[in-house]
Amino acid sequence: ILYTPLYDPEYERIAEWLVGNADRPEIEALTDTALDRAFAFFQQAKSVPGALAVAGLKGSDFILGWKRREDPLDIGFIDEASMLDKKQFEDLEEIFPTLLLFGDPAQLAPVNQSGSMVFDDLPEPRKLTLHRVHRQDLDNPILDLAHALADENLTFEGFERMIEDISAKDDRVILAPRVEAEMMARSPVLVWRNATRIRLIHAFRAAFDAPPDALLPGEPLICDGIELPLKHRKKRLDLEARGLIKGAQVVYLGPGRRSGFSRLHVVGAPEPQVSAASIIKIELPDEDEPFIPFAANMGATFLHGAAVTIHKAQGSQWPEVQVFAPDLYAASRAGRVEAGLPLWKRLAYVAITRAEERLHWVTRYRLAKPAEPLST
């Protein structure tokens, strides 16, 4: 199902005017100059929300909710297409007559597809292959490391020597003897194994003296989806519009005013401060059941964000990233191959390219104690 905004009646008049279905309105909250800006923008890009934003309005000013879109869409642009499974791809084909996929064949395929990606089976005339992608600016050495992984003769040990050589002459690649706890509060450590992720989260909380039965303000979370019945579709769409989508990075600020609610900062959202019914799960080492400090009957669900698996990190980026190399070494020793490429190379490729500016390649099972307490 596709949705379209449900506008406030006052601003619906502007939308109708922009698309040519009504005369120019007079809006008390907007000057003629603001309306002129909205009209000029709409002539260049046929976006009503964009035009209203140019006029100086926020989404919360003019969008009351969402309704089902009946008009078809001509084309769909799908980023991170390597993460699509076949069912999702088939659903998109039903919605869009034309699809433009952007995907990296060196990344990780969906876990249920044995290493294959939906664009693998497309005929060659419908593929455009880029041989060098300038993802980082200023000739960042992270790209050189990423491209080196295409060498079929490169071993894990050889790759780690490359990292050591580069780190000696460029501080954008750091060979780190331990995980930095303070950095985990801003960006997660990337790991392969779930058990490693849980142990690192437990170590992070212990380093900051977090109580076993509560969260500290400043602890990082990852949104794991929204658990709401269909009758609460409007609430789901409102939460998603505020940035609470699966994979969103969130900072816990404290308990909300109502039972089961949490005050949250959604990283990167236009209006980041959110209060939401929350189900927060903190997994513990060697325990089947997670610790749940907040459990509303329904709402947004969260996992701890101090460490995440590389699979879950795919599609995200952070200025600085810590990659837990012992896990990738274990993957190299396992000898697994996905679609002709060793699994450790796919993991390493995805992990190091999550870093926009600086890569920390962590070589030991150690955690550096923080110098400062958590802050919001």
Image: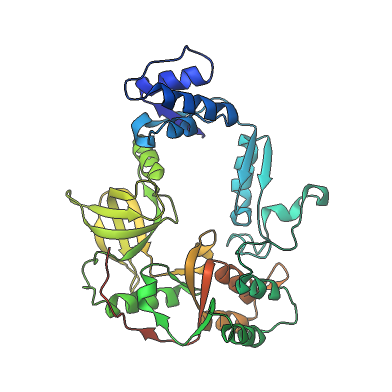
Q: Give the vertical position of 46 relative to 90 (above or below).
A: above
Instruction: Assign the C terminus to one quadrant of the image.
Output: bottom left
Q: Give the vertical position of 51 relative to 236 (above or below).
A: above
Q: Position of residue 179 (x, y in %)?
A: 42, 81
Q: In the image shown, does 376 or 23 lie closer to the viewer?
A: 23
**Figure colour scheme:** rainbow
Q: Residue at x 39, y 73 (%)?
A: 183
Q: Give the vertical position of 151 relative to 222 (above or below).
A: below
Q: Position of residue 242 (x, y in %)?
A: 37, 45
Q: Is residue 324 left or right of residue 286?
A: right
The single residue placed furthest to the right in the displayed view is: 125
Q: Residue at x 60, y 41 (%)?
A: 91
State the image quarter where residue 240 is shown: top left
Q: In the image shown, does 10 or 150 lie closer to the viewer?
A: 10
Q: In the image shown, does 11 or 290 lie closer to the viewer?
A: 11
Q: Position of residue 143 (x, y in %)?
A: 64, 70
State the image quarter where residue 350 is shown: bottom right
Q: Residue at x 65, y 39 (%)?
A: 93
Q: Is residue 355 left or right of residue 254?
A: right
- Report if residue 50 is visible in the image: yes
Q: Position of residue 365 (x, y in %)?
A: 43, 86
Q: Is residue 281 left or right of residue 188?
A: left
Q: Residue at x 36, y 25 (%)?
A: 30
Q: Is residue 21 left or right of residue 115?
A: left
Q: How many marks?
A: 0
- Report if residue 285 is visible in the image: no
The single residue placed furthest to the front in the displayed view is: 33
State the image quarter where residue 291 is shown: bottom left
